[in-house]
């Protein structure tokens, strides 16, 4: 499995709604509302690295209320 973390900035007032919607996306394993420069951190798990970009581009980045995302792919140590 490949794990990725997505750091999300939402529109003001949209954080709770976006966080709830993110939980319904396939391959999303965890969603956290956070304080700091980002509003939400999402954890994804997919079978292979090529599975990650479509999840981001088709399901997360297109979601209403999201201003920007930063994606981090984790490598096992």
Image (cartoon, grey):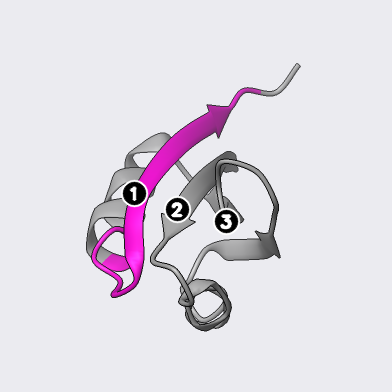
Decide which of tag 1 and tag 3 comes sooner along the chain.
3
The residue pinned by badge 3 equals 39
Question: In the picture, which quadrant includes the C terminus?
Answer: top right
Disc 1 target residue: 68
**Residue 43 image position (x, y, % from top left):** 62, 52
Q: Sequence order check: which comes first, mark 2 or mark 1?
A: 2
User: Where does residue 5 sit, x and y in percent of width and height?
Assistant: 57, 43
Q: Residue at x 48, y 76 (%)?
A: 13
- Tell me whether the residue at label 2 lies in contact with that at label 1, contact meaning CB atoms closer than 8 angstroms: yes
Q: Are marks 2 and 3 in contact (CB under 8 Å)?
A: yes
Left or right, 37 with reference to 25: right
Q: Secondary structure at mark 1?
A: strand
**Total tally of numbered discs in the picture:** 3
Nearer-the-camera pick, 50 or 6: 6
**The magenta stretch spans which residues?**
59-75
Among all residues in the image, which is located at the extreme front? 12
Distance, label 1 to label 3, CA atoms, is 10 Å
Quarter of the image where one finds residue 67: bottom left
Corner quadrant of residue 29: bottom right
Local packing at callout 2 (Cα closer than 10 Å; few below 14, some 14-19, many 20+) is many
Q: Secondary structure at mark 2?
A: strand
Which residue, given by chain and number where applicable, does mark 2 sit on?
9
SS label for mark 3: loop
Tell me if 9 is positioned left or right of 5 in this view. Answer: left
Residue 19: x and y in percent read: 56, 73
Disc 2 from disc 1: Cα separation: 5 Å
* Res. 57 in view: yes
């Amino acid at each position: 499995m490949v794990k990725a973390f997505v750091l999300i900035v939402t529109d003001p007032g949209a954080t709770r709604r976006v966080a709830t919607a993110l939980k319904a996306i396939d391959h999303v394993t965890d969603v956290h509302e956070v304080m700091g420069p980002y509003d939400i951190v999402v954890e994804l798990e997919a079978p292979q690295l090529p599975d990650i970009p479509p999840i981001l581009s088709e399901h997360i980045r297109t979601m209403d209320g999201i201003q920007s995302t930063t994606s981090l792919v984790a490598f096992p140590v």
